[in-house]
């Protein structure tokens, strides 16, 4: 195992506490709103860190919609949590993309002295949930901008509009992968989710998935089917971060932030996932071939670690194919090899690289990457229960698309 | 050549709104031509159009008529879509065509006159257009002659 430190050096910040609300697809009880779920998760995380709300002086979250009319109902902003918990904050921010960005900004705020204890959360009331879907217009709709060049062709949902089904089709063609290869991955993922008492499937529908179930599932957009989509939920996961030395006061383990890479800088950023608005970027699969060198330079080098040093990996699966792209981009396997790599027992709990041990977005719930970070954190804290990876030293959480990296590496020790 | 889609209710399809930036594309499509924006300094094609060249920053971009030839880069088959234009048309393909003039110059389209089983990655295709009413036409590629 590599022990020399790269640019990141010794961990300055640790995740001290974590809190979950119930993760569900059901309507909330009468009179209860997602804001209530969020506050419950935040209070749990603060108490888990051995703190009270009076100790929290920094807050941030990823919020898509921060209008006053929807705050607390479909999204939960820092302003909402600040008011409900009666906080006295010195640092607060609304993050633009995914929970990984929020965790990284909170790390930097603490490391830079802007605050001492930061509260981070992801609260979601997924707009894809039954009852939240907008009615389909019976009239002709007008589309402007770049969407005028795609929507009239009948793309539906993030799987197609985001290009994921198309990328999967090209991947299958180029490398010889099949749905049978994906079946193995999805079946194991469900198994992991059923070992996770906080996952959607464990809580709401504790049923195993077989290869046949996968192969016979309803196709959504070839070659991807129902079980290749993440599962929309409502709920919240919250985190409390603080100075690494504060971990000594905990009655449980901490997850030290070893380092990270983040370069989401908007839709014209370092390569969109697909041919983004005609910008002169490569198609996703071509771009992914460049990424192992990028992550060597900007992640593994500064960390002073290698992919093979990771005890476990929780990589994004908003759609299943993204996990394969991540495994290749991060160097866990070669380009075009992920579909074979995930066939092996090494991705089981007890294997060399247990993969997505919480069930991820596919099976714990779609929460903008929160399941991938929270599972990495729990594994490093040594609190993953029956899913616990033995001697978990480093856990990597990586979300969004590889070309828009939001990667954090957590450690069970300060080093 | 203007044709009608086999099953998609063309008159209900989402209607593109032309802008000053992209109007030449739609004007050409109506006349059955595939015009794509090109930087006059460095020669790079862009689709959808841009206000300036994303490679060399030139503001001098013009539309040029392309051959309409390309190959299927990738595609997907949509199994369900409740939008009225598409509800009766499933399953149908959404295809990304790599145009012949530049690597990975992708355009999104349907191939509504082609049986689904004949749509394959790498297949040579050529541009056709479908009139969707309200003065707009959309790309609808077909397998190239003799392919």
Image (spheres, grey):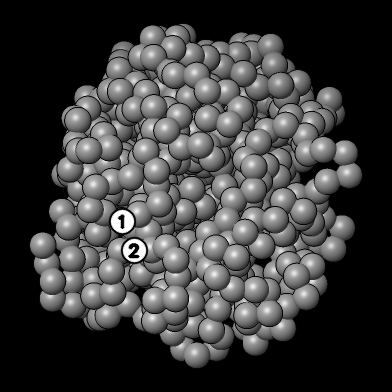
Q: Where, by quadrant of the figure, is residue A394 drawn?
A: bottom left
Confirm or deny contact between disc 2 and disc 1 (CB under 8 A). yes
Q: Which residue corresponds to mark 2?
A: A410
* x and y, in percent, of residue B35 in the image: 51, 44
The disc at residue A220 is none
Q: Answer above or below: position of A309 versus A58.
A: above
Residue A65 or A108: which is nearer the viewer?
A108
Residue B134 or A226: which is nearer the viewer?
A226
Residue drawn at point x = 42 percent, y = 41 percent: A358
Q: Is residue A154 left or right of residue A65?
A: left
* Extreme residue toward the bottom, this view: A113
Residue drawn at point x = 18 percent, y = 77 percent: A5
Residue A271 or A225: which is nearer the viewer?
A225
* Extreme residue toward the front, this view: A251
Q: Where, by quadrant of the figure, is residue A373 drawn?
A: bottom left
Return the disc, 2 or 1, that comes first in the chain's sequence: 1
Residue drawn at point x = 10 percent, y = 62 percent: A1
SS of the residue under disc 1? strand
Q: Residues within 10 Å of mark 1 (few under 14, many from 20)?
A: many
Q: Mark 1 falls within which chain? A: A
SS of the residue under disc 2? strand
The disc at residue A395 is 1
* x and y, in percent, of residue A26 in the image: 72, 32
Residue B108 or B37: which is nearer the viewer?
B108
Q: Residues within 10 Å of mark 2 (few under 14, many from 20)?
A: many
Count of numbered marks: 2
**Quadrant of the snapshot with the C terminus of chain A:** bottom left
Q: CA distance from mark 2 to mark 1?
A: 5 Å
Q: Where, by quadrant of the figure, is residue B130 drawn?
A: top right
Q: Mark 2 falls within which chain? A: A
């Amino acid at each position: 195992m590599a022990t020399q430190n790269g640019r990141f050096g010794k961990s300055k910040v640790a995740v001290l506490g974590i809190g979950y609300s119930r993760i569900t697809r059901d309507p909330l009880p009468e009179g209860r709103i997602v804001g209530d779920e969020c506050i419950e998760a935040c209070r749990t995380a603060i108490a888990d860190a051995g703190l009270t709300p009076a100790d929290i002086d920094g807050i941030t979250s990823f919020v898509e919609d921060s209008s006053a009319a929807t705050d607390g109902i479909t999204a939960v902003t820092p302003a909402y949590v600040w008011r409900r918990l009666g906080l006295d904050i010195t640092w607060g921010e609304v993050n633009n993309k995914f929970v990984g960005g929020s965790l990284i900004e909170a790390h930097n705020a603490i490391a830079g002295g802007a605050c001492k204890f930061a509260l981070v959360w992801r609260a979601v009331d997924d707009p894809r949930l039954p009852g939240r879907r907008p009615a389909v217009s019976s009239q002709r709709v007008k589309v402007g901008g770049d969407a005028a060049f795609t929507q009239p062709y009948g793309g539906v949902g993030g799987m197609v509009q985001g290009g994921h089904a198309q990328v999967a089709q090209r991947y299958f063609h180029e490398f010889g992968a099949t749905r049978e290869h994906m079946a193995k991955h999805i079946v194991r993922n469900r198994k992991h989710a059923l070992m996770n008492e906080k996952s959607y499937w464990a809580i709401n529908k504790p049923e195993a998935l077989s290869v046949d179930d996968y192969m016979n599932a309803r196709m959504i957009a070839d070659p991807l089917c129902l079980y290749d989509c993440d599962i929309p939920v409502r709920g919240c996961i919250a985190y409390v971060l603080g100075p690494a030395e504060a971990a000594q006061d905990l009655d449980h383990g901490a997850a030290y932030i070893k380092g990270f890479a983040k370069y989401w800088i908007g839709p014209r950023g370092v390569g969109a996932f697909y041919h983004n608005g005609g910008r002169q970027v490569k198609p996703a699969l071509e771009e992914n071939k460049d990424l192992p060198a990028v992550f060597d330079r900007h992640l593994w080098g500064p960390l002073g670690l290698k992919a093979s040093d990771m005890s476990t990996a929780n990589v994004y699966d908003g759609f299943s194919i993204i996990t394969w792209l991540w495994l290749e981009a991060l160097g866990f396997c070669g380009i075009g090899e992920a579909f074979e790599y995930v066939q092996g027992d090494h991705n089981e709990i007890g294997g060399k690289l247990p993969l997505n041990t919480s069930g991820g977005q596919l099976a714990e719930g779609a929460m903008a990457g929160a399941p991938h970070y929270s599972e990495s954190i729990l594994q490093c804290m040594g609190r993953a229960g029956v899913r616990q990876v033995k001697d978990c030293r480093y856990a990597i959480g990586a979300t969004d698309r590889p070309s828009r990296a939001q990667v954090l590496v957590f450690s069970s020790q300060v080093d | 050549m203007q044709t009608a889609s086999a099953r998609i209710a063309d008159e209900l399809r989402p209607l593109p709104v032309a802008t000053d930036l992209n109007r030449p594309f739609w004007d050409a499509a109506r006349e059955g031509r595939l015009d794509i924006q090109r930087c006059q300094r460095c020669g790079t094609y862009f689709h959808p159009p841009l206000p300036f060249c994303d490679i060399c920053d030139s503001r001098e971009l013009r539309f040029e008529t392309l051959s309409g030839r390309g190959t299927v880069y990738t595609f997907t088959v949509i199994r369900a879509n409740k939008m009225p234009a598409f509800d009766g048309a499933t399953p149908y393909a959404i295809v990304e065509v790599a145009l012949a003039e530049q690597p990975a110059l992708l355009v999104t389209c349907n191939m509504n006159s082609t049986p689904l089983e004949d749509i394959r990655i790498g297949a040579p295709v050529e541009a056709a257009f479908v009139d969707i009413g309200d003065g707009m036409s959309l790309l609808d590629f077909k397998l190239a002659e003799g392919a």
